[in-house]
Amino acid sequence: MITDTRRINEMSYTAFVAFVNQTNVPPGSYSTLTKWKNNSNLNAESKVLEVACTTGFSINALVKDVGCNGVGIDLCKDSVGQARINASEMGLGDKVDFKAVDGTLFTSESEFSHVVVGAGLGFFPQPQLMVDNICRLLGPSGYLLASPFYTVGEIPQKMLKQAETVFGITPTVQGYKDVMQLYKGFDVYFEERLEPLAETEKELHHYCESTVERAGALHQIDDESVKSAMYDRLYSIKKMSNDLRQYQGYNVLVLRYDAQRYPNRYVELF
């Protein structure tokens, strides 16, 4: 049991996310999941892989909704452990498997029909290596489900430095066309471009209070100073994300992979 506020603040970003069981959603949250499901032929016979799954929100929700089988992978062992707990509590213990592994090195005896990357693909140190492995994991064909951020205005350097301190990584600074270059070998089966709307202070507080109370019960933490430290750090994460929204857009993508054509494109984008 953690009884020291200092330990809360010394955790890495990923370890903290796992500790408070932050529901780390893709841009667009449930709305994005619905668009992926409705536009990618996802069904009970599908086999889905989520890369950089953190605490398992996307893979667990998709498996729960359509009754398919899934695998979630993430580098952070703590996140993978919490994702397993979340899956078990949703009654998915025999439907979803989680592994702590580098996505570029992950192998599977069977192929996947869908791979979920959300907004995470661009944050890999060598994203093309992850794309190459995704193609291997999909076999002859399949769907890549993504929701990357792109910039619609230049993010101030001061804000970028603050975000790097909070998240441990630099936010996306590329515009739409540069971001889409990573997916250039895939067919754009479905796309919707969107602008995120900043949350109000009441909405931020409601989310943070709810998450911290749940985490406090999970870890049996009664010390209000520790819960306050958890709240302050979670609020700083949400506030930083919220402040970035004015400079960001994102798109919901269903990308179709065809091994016979990839990485060439024979179909016009527009």
Image: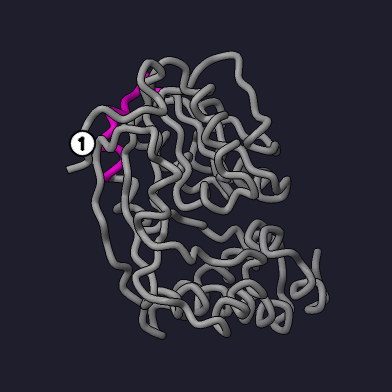
Residue topped by disc 1: 268
Residue 127, x across and y down, in percent? 57, 44
Viewer-side residue, 103 vs 22: 103
Q: Residue at x 39, y 78 (%)?
A: 203
Mark 1 Cα-neighbour bin, 10 Å: few <14, some 14–19, many ≥20? few
Q: Is residue 100 above or below residue 234?
A: above
User: For the magenta stretch, what is the residue range?
Assistant: 35-46
Q: Is residue 58 visible?
A: yes
Q: Amino acid at mark 1?
A: Glu
All told, the count of numbered labels is 1
| Secondary element at image label 1 | loop
Q: Residue at x 22, y 41 (%)?
A: 269
Q: Residue at x 22, y 30 (%)?
A: 267
Is residue 36 part of the magenta span, yes or no? yes
Residue 112, x across and y down, in percent? 47, 22
Q: Quadrant of the C terminus?
A: top left
Residue 142, x across and y down, in percent? 38, 24
Q: Is residue 154 above or below residue 174?
A: below
Q: Quadrant of the N terminus?
A: bottom right
Q: Is residue 175 above or below residue 238?
A: above
